[in-house]
Image (spheres, helix red, strand yellow):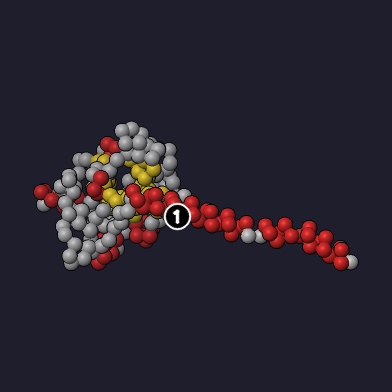
Amino acid sequence: MLAHRTSTALRRAPASQAAPARPARQLRLQTRANFVKWLFNGRHSKHWEPREGSTPRKISRSGYDVTPLTKEERDERAAALTPFEQYVVLQAGTERPWTGQTTNGFSHDNKRRGVYVSAVGGLPLFSSATKFESGSGWPSFYAPIDPEHVIEILDTSIPFMPRMEVVDARSGAHLGHVFNDGPSPTFKRYCINAAALKFVPEDEELPAESKPVSDN
């Protein structure tokens, strides 16, 4: 009986020794995730913060006011949006592909010429001249109107799948994500929610909030 118990214990020993393998694997995965986060943070450490009393005014190279809105100003402008549009721009939501519409009713696959401005604050973000058909079901652009009009922020909301979130530099509104699989000359694909945009056709005048500082 003793021999039987001893042999059984010996046979079961490898199983008990293998038990710590799962935590070790989790540790390796977490280490890799931390490395990726460190790598991306080293290159993209920007973030958006609402304006406070000491925040200096900032004008982009193309002449637009990109000074951050205060939290109160942002909430006031977002109040005019639908609940779903607020979900997209304020809570980093995502519209279903092939269904998106801008806040003024233009389809995600709109082919008209014009300018896409932020749904919160009206900052010009993308031009129809850089819009292309990506096959993704979301409006896609290979470049913003001005790089200073958007901020790219590391998004680690999906484990082990880091992405670059794109937000409006003036309001901090969530726009979408940018990927490195676009066409030339930038090879970037700014994959943007239509619900985060307002489209202004080229034959219509831009609202005051969407004009360069010199025009106001």
Residue 39 falls left or right of residue 11: left
The x and y percentages for residue 191 are: 37, 45
Q: Residue furthest right?
A: 1
- Comparing 38 with 181, the one in front is 38
Measuring 35% from the left and 51% from the top, which residue is drawn there?
42
Residue 6 falls left or right of residue 202: right
Q: Residues within 10 Å of mark 1 (few under 14, many from 20)?
A: few
Residue 20 falls left or right of residue 60: right
- All told, the count of numbered labels is 1
Measuring 11% from the left and 52% from the top, which residue is drawn there?
216
Residue 140 seen from this side: no
Residue 44 falls left or right of residue 161: left
Measuring 27% from the left and 61% from the top, which residue is drawn there?
49
Q: Is residue 163 above or below residue 57?
A: above
Q: Quadrant of residue 21?
A: bottom right
Measuring 54% from the left and 57% from the top, which residue is drawn there?
27
The x and y percentages for residue 205 are: 17, 46
Q: Quadrant of the N terminus?
A: bottom right
Q: Residue furthest top?
A: 184
Q: Which residue is mark 1?
A: 34
- Comparing 144 with 108, the one in front is 144
The x and y percentages for residue 162 are: 43, 50
The x and y percentages for residue 174 are: 34, 54
**Helix, strand or loop at mark 1:** helix
What residue type is disc 1 on? Asn
Residue 58 seen from this side: yes
- Comparing 192 with 53, the one in front is 53
